Image: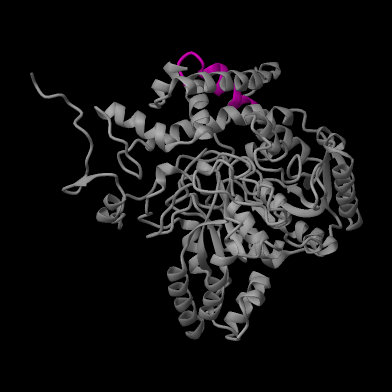
Amino acid sequence: MRHVAKLARLALTETEVAQYGSQLAGLLAFVDELRELDTEHVGPTAQVIESRNVVRADDVAPCLDGAEVLAAAPQAQNGFFRVPKIIAAAQ
Amino acid sequence: MAGADDILACTAREIAHAVNARERSAVEVASAVSGTVAGRDRGLGAYLTLTPQLMLAQAQRVDERVAAGESLPLAGVPVAIKDNMCLRGTRTTCGSRMLEGWTAPYTATAVERLLEAGALPIGKTNMDEFAMGSSCENSALGITRNPYDRERVPGGSSGGSAAAVGAGLATIALGSDTGGSIREPAAFCNVVGFKPTYGRVSRYGLVAFASSLDQIGPFARTVEDAALTYDAIAGHDRRDATSVDRPLETTAAALRRDLRGLRVGIVKEFATADLGAAIDRCYARAYADLAALGAELVEVELPTAKYGLATYYLIAPAECSSNLARFDGVRYGLRVAGADVGEMYEQTRALGFGPEVKRRILIGTYALSSGYYDAYYVKAQKARTAIADDFKAAFAHCDLIASPAASAPAFTFNAKSDPVAMYLMDYYTIPVSLAGLPSLSVPCGAVVPDGGTRPMPLGLQLASPLFTERLLLGAAHAYERHTRHAEKLVPA
């Protein structure tokens, strides 16, 4: 559970680890019934509508208003999203 | 001038007719509606945000266009919008703490098309967080009650939209349906709820949950209004690469008076005896009414439909875990500070998401993780093919499939604390969603639930082959016109 939470970038408390751990075990037991379905000769479906690769013309067109987008962000500076420092300072 | 009661009792068709004929102005409609909805929504909780200024400005534009000689299909029709669809300048919360303070910088295509057709936005409606749930109880921002019994849930995830239309606090509404999130709340709230074929309505501006399943659709009090709304929002959009580029047929002009010449499939595996005697009688009566309208009833088999829930609860969480990765404290809404950027991600997501969203992210991450991908995710995708193939085979013998829309009528708050018990509500809608088919719920009677005091509505689900919306809505109209179940119940 802790490994999966790490992959999902989700901090869990001890209580949550126990609670979700048991609920997910229950869910996995529930979905396990799929094992009895024979799918050996069946291909996977990613999307039900048969579709071709979709391309669009490479036209210049109006896009979202930058100031409006940044106004809805937690922190912005000089026209960019501002985030905590990612690279540690050289020692 | 007519009051709000008169206006909110009218159908969309009637309002649009009156506004286009200049018998009533859109501004009159907007003023009457915004003067009453706020008060009447207290104690119901259908809306998270009301947009009276936007509604009035839009009404003025509609009146100008009508005065200039235009005729608009939804002229002056008050509409409620589920809060996972963007409306520029208005907060779009998805029922989540994560987006509680987020203002949309653009408008969803479906919403834009409704406005273009003359509809007036009343506000944004409550929903299960990020559309995950069947009761609206997973909203982090408030409780929505069922208009027919305030002690019961409105269904979900589009519960606010269904309750708004069911209570007469909106003429029409938009919802989104991934596994039943339009059809189940429609059944619970005594209204029509319609999920079009996957790809028929653009998802641009709809906050994604499970992208291969999500589809926007209307709620209305009549099938005809649902058809009018669908006609306004459907069609290709270059901003959504999965929206389908093929000719559209208008549906509102092709409503049927009977079902002669149609074969309706009754699914052998969906026998209703287990749902209780009263519910069983209700559906037997509904099927008999379809036959009375001239349909030939045929038994069809969907042997893999029972695997629908298990399939869905792998595919939808997998897609959700990927889609919701974008909520990391950088670009939208909430940010919780951390010692470094990793801790910021983890703490933001810990505080921003509620329990059901966390559960689905965790199971989806697990199903997609190295070593489990083939056993869970690919297996579910193959099961999805088998389920879709079953529907194709069934439609060789019938034109429509009829079934219950939900496993029970609206339940009381906190009645489904076990996640799987909640998931079972969508037993009949999920296989249809996995196959991408158009389907709807239309009121088909009422039963007094165990422990309940008032009759609660039930919904009949009708499903049809891909891209046959015209047939589906046409047939549902004939059934509605013949039975008139919705009119027999009055809100509490």
Instruction: Indicate the colouring scheme.
Output: one colour
On screen, residue B306 above or below A80? above
Q: Measured from the top left, where is residue B92 in percent x and y?
A: 43, 52
Q: Position of B189 compared to B60: left or right?
A: right
B444 horizontally vs B354: left or right: right
Horizontal placement of B481 versus B379: left or right? Answer: right
Examine the structure image and report whether residue B323 is included in the region drawn in magenta. no
Tell me which corner region of the image, top left, top right, bottom left or bottom right, holds residue B271: top right
Dominant secondary structure of the magenta stretch? helix
Magenta region: which residues?
B369-384
- Residue B79 in picture, x, y percent from top left: 56, 64
- Of residue B252 and residue B245, the one placed in the foreground of this image is B252
Residue drawn 67% across the image and 54% down it = B193
Q: Is residue B40 left or right of residue B116?
A: right
Picture layout, residue B109 above or below residue A22: below
Q: Residue at x 30, y 46 (%)?
A: A73
Q: How many marks?
A: 0
Which residue occupies the foreground of this view, B389 or B456?
B456
Q: Position of residue B438 (x, y in %)?
A: 66, 48
**Toward which corner of the image does residue B435 lie, by quadrant?**
top right
Of the pair B415 and B223, the residue shown nearer to us = B415
Residue B247, visible in the rendered structure = no
Quadrant location of the C terminus of chain B in the rendered image: bottom right
The N terminus of chain B appears in which quarter of the rendering?
A: bottom right
The outermost residue toward the left is A91
Which of these two is toward me, B321 or B329?
B329
Asked whether B381 falls inside the magenta stretch, the response is yes
Which residue does the image show at 65% across and 29% down from the upper left? B420
Q: Residue furthest top?
A: B371
Position in image of residue B58 (x %, y %): 45, 72
